Image (cartoon, grey):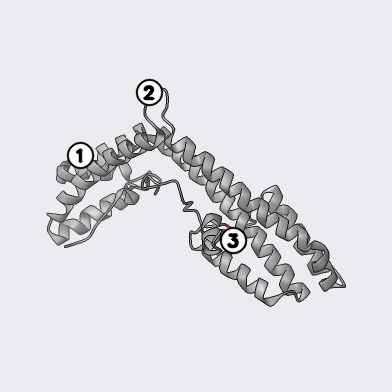
Amino acid sequence: MGQNFEVADLGKKAPPLDGDLSRAQYEPKVAQAEKPAAADGTQKEAPVELSPLGKKVVEALDAVNKAKDKPQALKDNTKLFEDSIKAADDNFDKVSKDAVDAFKKPGADGKSLEDKFKDAQGEVDGHTQKAQEAFQKLKPEDQTKVQGLVEDLQDPDKAAAAMKTLNDKYPDIGKPISEAEASLKKNQPVFEQVEKLEKSMGEAVQDSAITRQAYMGALKAGGGDNAKLQALQMEVLVLMMGGTPSDLKKDDGK
């Protein structure tokens, strides 16, 4: 029936956590750093911000690539790559445990961050559900108008006028949207705490991916073990698809 709109259409959305901090949902920024538009409209590669561990393996990869005897350079740096992968994965385990503990540990008020997040998300969802139900009852032409107004809410120059029109002409939609935005603002500290935990896990996953990609590059440059290269490629793919180092250990039966 008709179209749909969500809180995301307002340009604001609570973290996609669904009450579960056991998996990091951030894609590692390894091979797909955002590419800002250049003055001529083309896309330029943006440098990825590397951790100290990431910088170390990238420097080792650079050394292999520049070496006259690349196979020997690979041999000289193999332990560094393998130790770095282990260090990154061990760090993820620690960061993940700390994040889950912080998420689930009751605070002074007896409520955990998980409880507060679920309450806040439920409050926002309740308002958006009311708006969605009212939206579905509109005629198709009115749905199109409302969708345009909701999109205008993202434009600072149009937001006030769009909100006024929604409240005047479509109050069953305007009111819950206003209430959803108020809930987001009120609960922003909770959402920010959750985002901080997710970010820490995402950065840890990124290190696990970057250390593997650097080793992959060195194996290619130095003519290393092809079976090892293929195994690393599969592991990076798992990480790029939203998996974690913990998933890789499960696959290995560890």
Q: Quadrant of residue 59?
A: bottom right
Mark 3 and mark 2 residues within 8 Å of each other at the beta carbon: no
Relative to residue 167, is residue 62 drawn left or right? right
Badge 2: residue crowd in 10 Å (few <14, some 14–19, many ≥20): few
Identify the element where label 3 is drawn.
loop
Residue 30 counted in the magenta span: yes
Residue in view at x 21 percent, y 47 percent: 129
First-in-chain label (1 vs 3): 3
Residue 55 counted in the magenta span: no
Identify the element where label 2 is drawn.
loop
The residue under label 2 is 109
Viewer-side residue, 50 vs 201: 201
Query: Which stretch appears magenta?
Result: 29-34
**Residue 209 drawn at (x, y percent):** 60, 59
The residue under label 1 is 175
Identify the element where label 1 is drawn.
helix
Residue 49 appears in view: no
